[in-house]
Amino acid sequence: MIAADRPKTVRANVHLPPRPASNGHTPLASVVIPTYNRAQFIGRAVGSALGQTLQDIEVIVVDDGSRDATASVVREIDDGRVRYMKLDRRTGGGRARNVGIAAARAEWVAFLDSDDEWLPAKLEAQFDRASMHGRAEDAIVPCGAYRQDANGPRRVHLRRDLPEGEVLDSLLLSDHPADDHGFWLTTSALLVKRRSLLAVDGFDETLPSFQEFDLLLRLARASHRVLPVDEALMIKHDHLMGRIGTDPIAKLRGFLRVTRSWRRFVVGRLGAAAYDRWVSSRTERIRAMHERRLDELASAAARGEALRYVMAMSPHAAWGRRHLLRALAVAVAPGRSASRAGALSE
């Protein structure tokens, strides 16, 4: 693809603090943790990074303008490997991660969302996997993941068949990247060379979601290969506090932006029919997320919130008569589920 066709990364101005002197030692990995108002979770995330069997790391917490006690929690952690950086205002996870990448001292960068958690052997297993590859500089090293319920200890192993090797066409053709089980795409599972991230301009800071997917498309297009660790070594915690990953509106807005920016490339590589399938399969999955969210509101008899949700969702896609009736039925009839409303609208 010629340079003019390349999706652009637009960044807000950011003033980075100087990277600290390494005192003759560079850590093996820089762990970048973006956070916003996660005081109740950030200690767990940082602790899981510091508790890795691979101890030669630095942990960079990039606070995206939190207004809670996040700063106090991080500053109370008595470990010289932790660096805390606060941005003046909230601008999104993409910018926070890019700030962390810019400040990182290590050759390898791993990401950890502040409400996620690593198991102790995560980084060591990824470094072992990378060492098996003759061209480690071109490696993307994900691990498997668990999802843990908010109300109990139940864990679900989300993926057991992580893709391997050249994955560009797989990302464009398979159903995995946008479904609920495609968590190798989450940043918390990834280990990547810092130079690789800089070479593709890091995360697109204009995207409200699908930032990981867009980044991986650009890495894959640049001939990076996936070297997976199939063992589940990170935990996605479900919780009641809002997160982009479970916000269908943000998911839809981000996906529509990604598909528009990649349309010319996908059509040129795979054809218009493949592009249409790429868009429709993932849009349907986001619709399913939309209906699950409505079911949650229906269970809580939250009529006002359901109606506001429908109003916010409606400008972003033509859901069609069936989906609209489901949404309205939930909004006006507390206690009715989206699935039941769907049966009535057939």
Image (cartoon, grey):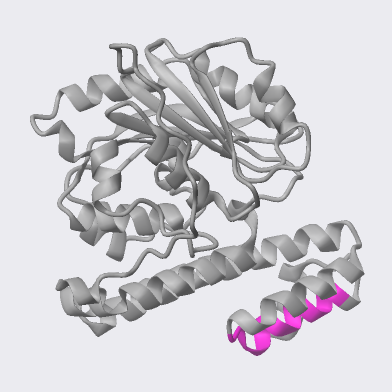
- Point out the stretch of residues depicted in magenta: 318-331
Give the vertical position of 303 relative to 276 (above or below).
above
Query: Is 153 situated left or right of 217 in this image?
Result: right
Q: Residue at x 82, y 61 (%)?
A: 297
Q: Look at the image and tell me in which quarter the N terminus lies.
A: bottom left
Residue plotted at (85% across, 67% down): 305
Instruction: Give coordinates of residue 190: x percent, y percent.
Output: 37, 37
Residue 320 rendering spot, x and y as whole percentages: 62, 88
Q: Position of residue 155 (x, y in %)?
A: 59, 30
Q: On the picture, is 252 further left or further right than 331?
A: left
Q: Is residue 323 magenta?
A: yes
Q: Is residue 285 above or below residue 343?
A: above
Q: How many marks?
A: 0
User: Is the residue 272 above or below the residue 201 in the image?
Assistant: below
Depth check: 112 or 346 in front? 112
Q: Describe residue 48's horizontal placement relative to residue 278 as left or right.
A: right
Instruction: Name which residue lies at 64% across and 59% down.
Output: 247
Name the outermost residue toward the left: 134
Residue depicted at x 43% and y 33%: 18
Classify the position of the C terminus by image quarter. bottom right
Secondary structure mostly taken by the magenta-highlighted segment of the chain: helix
Residue sitting nearer the eye, 135 or 321: 135
Is 154 colored magenta in this rendering? no
Residue 176 is at least partly visible in this image: no
Query: Where does residue 36 sit, x and y in percent of width and height?
Result: 66, 43
Question: From where the camera sits, is residue 61 visible?
Answer: yes
Extreme residue toward the bottom, this view: 321
Q: Is residue 319 above or below residue 39?
A: below
